[in-house]
Amino acid sequence: MKFVSTRGESKALSFSEAVAEGLAPDGGLFVPQTMPDISRKIDSWEGLGYADLCFEFLKIFATDIPEADLRKLVDRSYRNFDDPEIAPMRRLFGDVYLLELYHGPTLAFKDFALQLLGNLYEYLLEKNGGRINVIGATSGDTGSAAISGLLGKKNVNIFILFPEGRISPLQERQMCCTGADNVFPIAVRGTFDDAQAIVKDLFGDVEFKAKWNLSAVNSINLARILAQCAYYIYASLKLPKAERAKATFIVPTGNFGNVLAGWMAHRMGMPAAGFRVATNQNDILYRLFKTGVYEVGDVKPSCAPSMDIQVASNFERFIYYLEGENSDKVRTIMSEFKKKGRWNFENFNAGGFSASKMDDAEIPAAIREVYEKSGAVIDPHTACGFKDLSGEGAKIVLSTAHPAKFPSIIGQAIGVEPVSPALEKLLDRELVKEVMDADKELVRKYVETHGI
Ligand SMILES: *Cc1c(COP(=O)(O)O)cnc(C)c1O
């Protein structure tokens, strides 16, 4: 199978090539050249374990990786999850289910994609030769999931910048207590925006970027989306057959990567009634699905910080399908949006999506209500999914982070602070980080000294 850019001006690439590229050279995102039809295969996947199902799904796309190799990559990627089901689903009350996506090493759903991506990078570098230096900035969660995915991988060093003193102690421990010698956490004295600006500058320096093979593990990588399709199919197959087409997936959303994966699986033939985009008070996507107008606003920091976004980076893939795979139209929309910060979709068709929005003030009450009704302790991101439980059939709320990552807000809501043995273990480990001023030259020197 080949993959093309949403903007139509890059050549079609194999799976491995598209994964290695990340962003297409024309600035677009990679999508399958033709959407496969999995509707007849799906039934035969019923009863498969998580890794088996994921392998069956991915081999449709990764046709340039020998099956035996892909099998090993997938097995290795889901080995470090702390639940034998990998993505267990349980009924909370009535027809509401919780799909727990927080059993990976950093206790957030990003592990599903980044564990696989880390193994794919290592595999491709070993096969094709070469080495890369991954550089990114994080305000917390993505950095730890990226680090965990690349931990100890051969031919890869990873540098993650974060604002010193402005991330939670737990997030800092997740990044700085890995003990791995290819991981370089950099605490800059400044804000997240300062850290981000330095990373952008380094990537903008073409010579430096080429010399050090700089690479980003951003949320638009094709492999991340495809890896995430698997848990939707897995969850669907846990429902009785007659219920599957009536199910609504409710997805706490930021960059639109998670929910897009489910929607793509549906386009390939996975039965579902719809997908609900659950935002926090940063509601650009909520407004879009209500009005057909896509318009940037200011980021309002919330207590579900991994969903605090201004522009949803994966949204371009949805536009591509919304516009009937018309790349010319995608280019027009994206450039107009870049210029004006706004696009009005005429005769907007939500394409099976609905949306809900939860303000910060509502989150503790939602956590409390779910706890009282079911005994389940949910994190503030997941809580946003409980704003709107309407719909006829099963409602599957995706739980994107382990509650122990946000002990204080949960303590406020229900009077109990959740703990996680994995996080407790970090307390005994040595914390290693490089603290420096928010100065691009200092970071550049550091990369030159520690890069491979
Ligand atoms: C990243 C993240 C999200 C948002 O996911 P997107 O794919 O960006 O929509 C939601 N919850 C948590 C806990 C996250 O880490």
Image (spheres, helix red, strand yellow):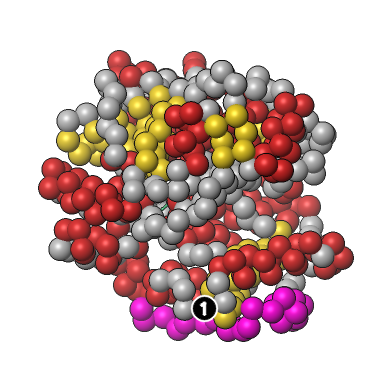
- Is 446 on the left or on the right of 160, as rendered? right
SS state under label 1: loop
Q: Is residue 330 visible?
A: yes
The part of the chain drawn in magenta is 427-449
User: Horizontal and vertical percent for residue 273?
Assistant: 38, 21
Q: Amino acid at mark 1?
A: Glu
User: Horizontal and vertical percent for residue 290?
Assistant: 44, 29
Extreme-right residue of the structure: 207
State the residue position of label 1: 164
Magenta stretch encompasses residue 174: no
Image: 71 above or below 39 = below
Instruction: Depth check: give the residue in front, 293 or 355.
Output: 293
Magenta stretch encompasses residue 446: yes
Residue, x 30% and y 47% (percent of image)? Answer: 383
Residue, x 42% and y 20% (percent of image)? Answer: 271
Image: 422 above or below 256 = below
- Is 255 on the left or on the right of 81, as rendered? right
Residue, x 17% and y 63% (percent of image)? Answer: 416
Quarter containing the N terminus: top right
- Is 445 on the left or on the right of 317, as rendered? right
Quarter containing the C terminus: bottom right
User: Horizontal and vertical percent for residue 193?
Assistant: 59, 66
Q: Is residue 152 visible?
A: no
